[in-house]
Image (cartoon, rainbow, N blue to C red):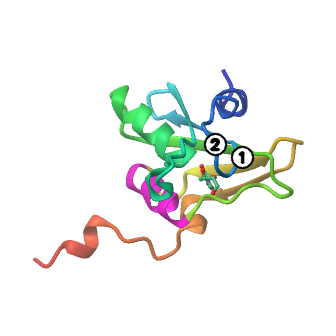
Amino acid sequence: MTLAKAAAEVRERAWVPYSRFKVGAAIRAASGKVYAGCNVENVAYPEGTCAEAGAIAAMCAGGDYKIAEVYVIADSPEPVPCCGGCRQKIAEFAGPDVRVTMATTDGKEKTVTVAELLPGVFSAAHMDRA
Ligand code: THU
């Protein structure tokens, strides 16, 4: 299945009673497997989770830890940008050259790399003193 289709399908299952803004995300892992996630909101608003976080959790649950490609879709006038927290979450499992495509439900797409999405990323190397 294409990432675009997986993301569009899972988006329909988002739980968004508060924002009414459904987001779908799909990840192709280095293994070739595709994992998908949607946003899941909560009445305690900060407890809600983004679509990207759901897809990453599904990927780890499936035993994959390396992202090869990401696709995110929402019903938005312009391709939906991943939030700051999700940029860091993606960077945990993706190299700087991994492509992230942001899309609208009416077919607009914008593709950037992880390095473009999160310049100056905090990484494990920043904790190396020796
Ligand atoms: N949201 C995502 O799931 N991913 C993004 O990249 C941007 C925002 C969700 C969080 C919340 O459920 C809704 O969109 C409105 O912020």
Residue for point 52% across, 41% down: 68
Q: Amino acid at mark 1?
A: Arg
Residue drawn at the location 37% of the way across and 25% of the way down: 62
Q: Position of residue 25 (x, y in %)?
A: 61, 40
Left/right placement of residue 61 relative to residue 51 reads left
Along the line of sight, which residue is nearer the eye, 48 or 68? 48
Identity of the residue furthest to the right in this view: 106
Q: Which residues are magenta?
A: 84-93
| Tag 1–tag 2 contact (CB < 8 Å) | yes
- Distance from disc 1 to disc 2, alpha carbons, whole Å, reads 5 Å
- Judge the density around disc 1: few (<14), some (14-19), many (≥20) Cα neighbours within 10 Å: few
Q: Estimate the x, y position of residue 23 in percent, counting from the top left.
A: 66, 43
Quadrant of residue 117 within the rendered picture: bottom right
Tell me what residue is drawn at x 51 percent, y 49 percent.
43
Please identify the quadrant where the N terminus is shown.
top right
Magenta stretch, overall SS: helix
Residue 19 or residue 121, whichever sits in front: 19
Vertical position of residue 106 compared to residue 127: above or below: above
Q: Which residue is mark 2?
A: 16
Q: Is mark 1 within 8 Å of ligand 1?
A: no
Look at 55% across and 59% down and name the residue there: 114
Q: Is mark 2 within 8 Å of ligand 1?
A: yes
Q: Is residue 91 magenta?
A: yes
